[in-house]
Image (cartoon, rainbow, N blue to C red):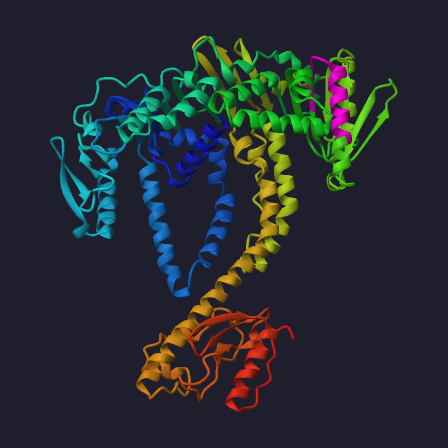
Amino acid sequence: MNGLRRLSWICLSLLVVAGFVVTDVAAASAVEELTRVMPDDTVYFIATSGCDALKDECAKTIFGRMCSDPQVTSFVTQIKNELMTKVGHEDERAEVAQMVQMAIGYGQLLLKRPILIGAARAETVEGPPACFFGILDAGDRKPELEAALAQVEAMIGEDEIGQIDVGALKMHSLKDNDDVPLYWGWVGNYLIVGVNDQQGVATKYLASPRATPTDHLKKVPGHGDVLAVYEDLQQIWQIVQSFAFREGGQDDLIPIKLALDELGVSKIGTIVGRVGISGTDLVSDSFAQVPEPRTGLFAAFKPVDPAMLGVVDAQAVTAGVVNVDLGHIYDTIMKTVKAVSPDEGYPEVQEGLAELESEVGIQLRDGLLQSLAGPVVLYSLPAGRMPEAPMGGLVAMLKLRDAALFEKTMATLGAFVSEKAEGMLQVGSQTDEQGRTIHVWASPVLAFAQVMPTWSVVGDQVVIGSNTALCTMGIKRVASPSQGVSSLLDTEGYKKATTDLPANLLSLSYIDSQAQFTQMMMQLRQVWPLATMGAMKAGIKLPVMLPDLGAIIKDMQPACEYGYARPDGFYSHYRGTGLEVSLRGVAGGALAAGVLMPSLARTRQLAFRMTSGTNLSSIGKACLIYANDHEDELPPNLEALVTEAELPAQCLESKRKPADFDGPSYVYIAGQTTAMYPGNIVAYEDTRYCTEGVNVLFLDSHVEFMKPGQFRQELKATYERLGREMPEIRFRDE
């Protein structure tokens, strides 16, 4: 589900970038209309309605407002322009920029219209019994798309393109088209691309569409279809089996089939996912057809009660509840291993687990997992709101089946880890006012960030906090839930986000989008200066200030996501800004960028070093050409190679040489012949602009990168063999 939303935001991002044309949204989405021309026996497709149909809706979303904000557009433009100045050689940048703009332009044009890409069953000569296709409804943009396609075909070349018959249609195809049969062309306003489709399966309904859309997407509601996905896993598996049988590899599928059966995955039928827009929110719904009775991993998920979130602090930014039988998952995995490899893999896994349990002194299945009941509540608290925990953190409450067994197992595990950690993990405990034992697992590295995992058993639950203060707060809520202290359930944001929850909930999560985004931006502002400084070391000038998004942030509403079960399968629903997913880890990414920018600079210098070495290699080859025409004598200077040996002039300039350095890129040792000692140095980079070492060309034409000490020795030996005095060598950092 999270993957579907992440992909939807990529799609929506491109739609926003592409620009919009005002249009009314039809009762059926553009994707639904596009299914009217989709081939029979389609087993998979992914589609979008295109920005022509989604302009008004996208503009209302938080993300759409951000993309159109002047500060954001200016910020992105600055970064894009700066990066473009660093691409390739100076004389190549205009060409690279043109190619990038062309690619972006094509992408924007395609995303303006409804597109569907999929696969269908088909009779084929070779390969799997399936064809792959892409269908685009060009609508009134057909002239633009025809022109764009003509440009692409021109780049391929007329000599490379031919025509083939696809059913009764004439289509374009590559002449060298034997390995992967490919065709493309127009049928009315539809642009079709087909692969492995000799029978023209994908073109069947293009000229005469079905009267109504297909029912592929009807299991879940749609809201304009920013993104829609459909998979028929049963049909896909049959295609895989048919192909394996054709190729004689059916035996290879036996262990896969056994594993899928034990995991319960073989019971999955169709999967449908739709992402759209409702008001200012992103809305996504999905369905996985897994009929009852459910086995394998699916049987491990149990119903949850939203009332369990009554132990969550009212200030929580995120909160969730799930009920998973981890013991059942363990058993399912072990059964799967036994089914797939009963004589080798299963005994090895059992032996390995037995050794681990013996060494640690615990029982995994009959100890730790047996002690857990299943329900888990997890929530996060923001930084800067509580004096006891200024950095915020995480709290988890796990329901226990056997509290004494859990505490004994965890204490034994902590002692073992502490002993093996050699001081990097210190395990201790203390007793609170009520006589409860609070266990603290302290790591010096994590403690620096005020992270000190702490846990304590309270009745039939264990409370775990990312630091002692949060654990203590969680203990009070579990021990005294009816003291009148407000919880998440009492907040208006939670009440608004969780209206009309369905029965048979399997999971529920809530996010205060405004608080989370504000905190992320605060963290990003803290690390952005580090990122800009790191970028400067790599020669990249990032904008100093981040955009101010306060006016947009204040309009963010809380988000809610939940999953539930019905007799025919599993359903999930999400409604929110979508940024809760796409911006997780942005602050960490910026920090990583700040740390990695110096590495980028280092990588850039290594690339320049390699380019300079290539120049010297070309100089060496040109020297041999010159010597062949001049009685084995090398040229009097390097410039002679340009005029007499066709050496490109740019080979005499090293990219390692600073712009303000007035000397030559390479130092040449004249007066040598090809008959001399092959280990003589012929040319080398001017050491006055080098630091860690220098590229060196030898008489036998090979090039080496040498450290200063080694280089001086080789250069001294060369001058001694030539009977000359060695010049003074000084590197830039000396």
Q: Is residue 616 visible?
A: yes
Q: Quadrant of the C terminus?
A: bottom right
User: Where, by quadrant of the figure, is residue 106 drawn?
Assistant: top left
The region drawn magenta spans 396-415
Q: Main secondary structure of the magenta part?
A: helix
User: Where, by quadrant of the figure, is residue 376 drawn?
Assistant: top right
Percent from the top left, x then y, of residue 178? 21, 42
Kindly identify the residue that appears in the image at 44 percent across and 37 percent down.
13
Answer with left or right where residue 626 lies relative to residue 123: right
In the picture shown, does residue 439 fall above or below 425? above
Q: Is residue 115 magenta?
A: no
Camera-nearest residue between 291 and 272: 291
Kindly identify the residue that appears in the image at 64 percent across and 46 percent down.
527
Picture mark count = 0
Camera-nearest residue between 6 and 626: 626
Camera-nearest residue between 352 and 625: 352
Q: Is residue 414 magenta?
A: yes
Percent from the top left, x then y, of residue 379? 66, 24
Kindly identify the residue that appears in the image at 39 percent across and 36 percent down.
15
Q: Is residue 322 visible?
A: no
User: Where, by quadrant of the figure, is residue 95 drawn?
Assistant: bottom left
Answer with left or right where residue 544 lies relative to residue 468: left
Answer with left or right where residue 73 lies relative to residue 347: left
Percent from the top left, x then y, of residue 679? 48, 79
